[in-house]
Image: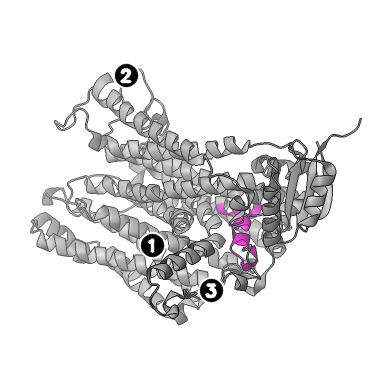
Amino acid sequence: MSKLLNGLIARFDSPGAAMHAAEAVRDAGYTKWDVVTPFPIHGMDAAMGLKRSFVPRFTLLGGMTGFTIGMSMIWFMNAYDYPLVVGGKPLFSPMFAFPVSYELTILLAAFGTIFGMFFLNRLPMHYHPVLKYDQVHRGTDDAFFIVIEARDPKFSRDGARKLLESVGGTDINELED
Amino acid sequence: MDRVESHTAGAHGAAHHAGPAVLREVNPAILPRPTLVENDRSFNWITEKICGIIEEETPRWWWISFAVACFVASFTLVGLVYLVTTGTGVWGLANPVNWGWAIVNFVFWIGIGHAGTLISAILCLLRQKWRTSINRAAEAMTIFAVICAGIFPLFHTGRVWYAVWPGFLIPFPNSNYIWPNFRSPLEWDVFAVSTYGTVSVLFWYVGLIPDFATVRDRAKTRLRKIMYGIVAMGWRGSNRHWSNYEMAYLLLAGLSTPLVLSVHTIVSFDFAVSLIPGWHTTIFPPYFVAGAIFSGFGMVLTLMLPLRSIYRLEDLITQYHIDCMCKIILATGTMVGYAYAMEFFIAWYGANPYEGFAFINRAFGHYAWAYWIMISCNVITPQFFWFKSIRENTTLVWVLSIFVNVGMWFERFVITVTSLARDFLPSSWGYYSPTVVDIFTYFGTFGVFCFFFLLFIRFVPLMAMAEIKAVTPQADPHHGHSATHH
């Protein structure tokens, strides 16, 4: 059974080289491609032409949910379901409900942020073709890789290889699906 | 950055066309920044160094410390079993001091945790990059300190299982239709501390994912590959992932910052919302937060300085890092000292006889010994950090950091016990002393803390490798040819 081609991977040895190469790949019009780096590189998002992350929307959603749950839970418990008079104070006031609602806002916003990030990144994913490449362990250590995927509409085996070579990529290999 | 500067320079130049050309020249002053990783270490060196700690054979000192920690932790276990089987009376809580070491230890441990969140969240938002070498261990410290803190309020209820079921603390529907009273600061504590614990764990774990991936990729044995593989979640260093990850990390830092301030503020409400003289003051929230950060940094130094010398981490935890932490201790310690003075001043200026008596009694009454230990450790100790020669003497810094921890424990003791032991009616005055069970349970929590911390050292990368690599000079994509840009 012949293995399917997933894409081409090329190695770069410095963050600067990887970033210049990324700019070239972006300008060549590729869309299904990625850079593998051991740490986030300042400016790489612009070099890849990535938009601002969507994670904050999940945070906002989580935070609003938390605050609403907090306020309505406390009103339901102490003023509606079992009205509790303490020291002749009103059955419900946003003041005494605030600390708990505030903590719930932060708790659910944090959950929203983290699970939103996992969702957007499609994690956990243990079977990605990049992980099968025998040199990729250097991508979490000290090397930088650019992957151009075969499903990119502009992809051709020779064209992508030429592009990666022209921007200084070394050790260009084919990834198997 | 470059583009922004040249753009403003252009606009500025256009507005003052008539002026001499020299006015249009922009020559931004470059502030000299201390290097965060010394001796020009490479990316690979950082990986080898930090992964090496968890990949090497378990050192003998670790086994010895682990055995000692387990032994000490057993004191807490025995103490708690005895408490649950016998009753809360074994903790020496009686009228008028119904809250002794239980709340003292709770506030103490919660405070210890705060430096971890401060380092990881507030310093992250303030772009203080020196945080990267110490944030991982400090966050671990936070989590373990919160575990130790949680023991005390939970067990002071006696039958701890009632906290969860039938919902006297955590609101669950139960057969008596009783809900928790949300007007009580103790109930706020439940939410504040559990949220703090949860968010600290999440923050810590998110920071760990890329480093777990590094460990997974280097793993030699199948077991390590599988275990680290599971926790790394298939992280592969994709920049599309980093983009979301960095945004998430920044947001978590933004969420943790008000969280850490609110947690200790709410802890201080346990006192400040009451009417007891010496507690009923508005200075409590900021003063407790400053104290928490003060004691937390004390504990960070107490833990990190021995680790630095055992694992030869001087290139990563540099003198600059120690300086920064000492200066934070100096600043927060001075704030705490200011708060002590201000409490006295307001007690006099407020002209409330009970309040005035509470403070004079603190300083000169039966607990004066505790008060003066507190003053010497918390107000005098940090002042040594004004001197560079002292900040550079690692042994001395370590000793002083322990004094900070001792002092902050006494601060909570003084606040809690002196106010309760001498309240409004002389007929109900008393003198509180802890029981043996109190002492053993508290002593044991240091074992609990060390038990977790030693496991952390052994199995988790001690420092945030990815973040440290990102603050090295060679991580800057313009490194090496920055001259062309300026």
Q: Is residue B304 left or right of residue B8?
A: right
Dot 1 amino acid type: Phe
Mark 3 and mark 1 in contact? Answer it, CB < 8 Å: no
Q: State which quadrant residue B166 falls in.
A: top left
Magenta stretch bounds: B453-475
Dot 2 amino acid type: Asn
Give the camera-side residue of A37 and B145.
A37
Dot 3 amino acid type: Pro
Which residue is denoted by mark 3 in the rendering?
Answer: B34
Which residue is denoted by mark 2 in the rendering?
Answer: B176
Name the quadrant of the C terminus of chain A: top right
Question: In the displayed structure, would residue A85 be above or below residue B242?
Answer: above
- What residue appears at the point 35 percent right and 75 percent down from the top-left corner? B383
- What residue appears at the point 22 percent right and 32 percent down from the top-left corner? A93
Q: Chain of mark 2?
A: B
The answer to which of marks 3 and 2 sits earlier in the sequence is 3
Which residue is denoted by mark 1 in the rendering?
Answer: B294
Name the quadrant of the N terminus of chain A: top right
As measured in the structure, the alpha-carbon distance from the residue carrying label 2 to the one carrying label 1 is: 44 Å
Mark 3 and mark 2 in contact? Answer it, CB < 8 Å: no
Mark nearest the camera among 2 and 1 is 1
Residue A44, x across and y down, in percent: 62, 53
Question: In the displayed structure, would residue B401 be above or below residue A36?
Answer: below
Q: Is residue B202 left or right of residue B358?
A: right
Secondary structure found at label 2: loop
Q: Chain of mark 1?
A: B
Q: Characterize the magenta stretch by its predominant secondary structure.
A: helix
Give the camera-side residue of A152 and B422.
A152
Outermost residue, right side: A1
